[in-house]
Image: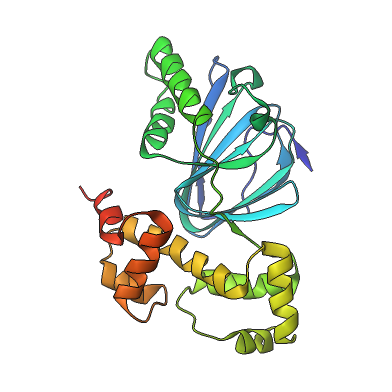
Amino acid sequence: MTENPYRLAANTATAAPDTANESSEDFFVTRDVSNDGLHFEPHRHDTDELMWAREGRLDVRFGGRNLSLHHGHMAWIPAQVTHEATLLGDGELMCLFADTRLRPTGDRWDQPHVVAASPLMGTLVHHLRDLDRPRAERRKTRELLTEIIATSDVREDTLALPRDRRAATVADALLADPADQRTLVELAEFVQISPRTLARIFINETGASLGKWRNRARLNHSLTLLKQGHTVEDVAAGVGYRTTSSFIETFRNNFGLTPAAYRRRFLV
């Protein structure tokens, strides 16, 4: 296990790591862009870390939990907590590293968890990468970000990933193709186990039935497609809904707004 790294080597030649953005201050931000995936082996830091996939899907592992995150999530990882991360496919990963003295107050921040990533939080993280800005401005930006993080909601809509090799194969297939319409029986046959065993593994290791897990995976992927500007109709078909109306209803019930309203947030 690597301890306290600043920059870890990626396992892909297509990754474009950020140049060192370290300064004399007690925080810094890094940015990695990948066209074909990026993986960081298990490691830990002396600093706290806020990890955010601005683009793409981020799988993180910490505290015995395997989670799949989208751009609406930021992973809070306290210092000395061993973690592993994978950015899937095309993506952009931004990480804020900060001295533990700068973390929000409260026991909540002693443990890793996922917080809601607001557009303002993303803007502030970007802002902190600019070392040409005055030191006092960067400090105030960091203080504002800390205040917002301190009051951010814990995200419970993260997608837990099964640890069992066979169930993980099914999960990877459904994440790679959210429109996959194979039934529980067909997916169980795909990994050569019984449907009952596959169903039990998903309940035990993700806390959700395969059907509910797949629906969450589809909704999470729809957020990425909508953010990219695809039409609601194309997104509904692309993530496996048989009708656009059923997609709109499910999206509204889960996120509190329509897909069209969410899409408009990112249109220039």
In the displayed structure image, the side of residue 223 where residue 205 appears, left or right: right
In the displayed structure image, the side of residue 98 where residue 92 appears, left or right: left
Residue 88 pos. (x, y %)? 53, 59
- What quarter of the picture does the N terminus occupy? top right
Picture layout, residue 112 above or below residue 200:
above
Q: On the image, which quarter does residue 210 sit in?
A: bottom right
Residue 254 pos. (x, y %)? 43, 59
Decide which of 31, 126 is in the foreground and name it.
126
Residue at screen point 43% across, 21% down: 144
Residue at screen point 36% across, 39% down: 119
In the displayed structure image, the side of residue 162 where residue 150 appears, left or right: left
Q: On the image, which quarter does residue 7 sit in?
A: top right
Decide which of 38, 109 is in the foreground and name it.
109
Residue 55 pos. (x, y %)? 43, 51
Evaluate whether residue 91 shows in this view: yes
Picture layout, residue 18 above or below residue 175:
above
Residue at screen point 34% across, 72% down: 236
Residue at screen point 37% across, 54% down: 256
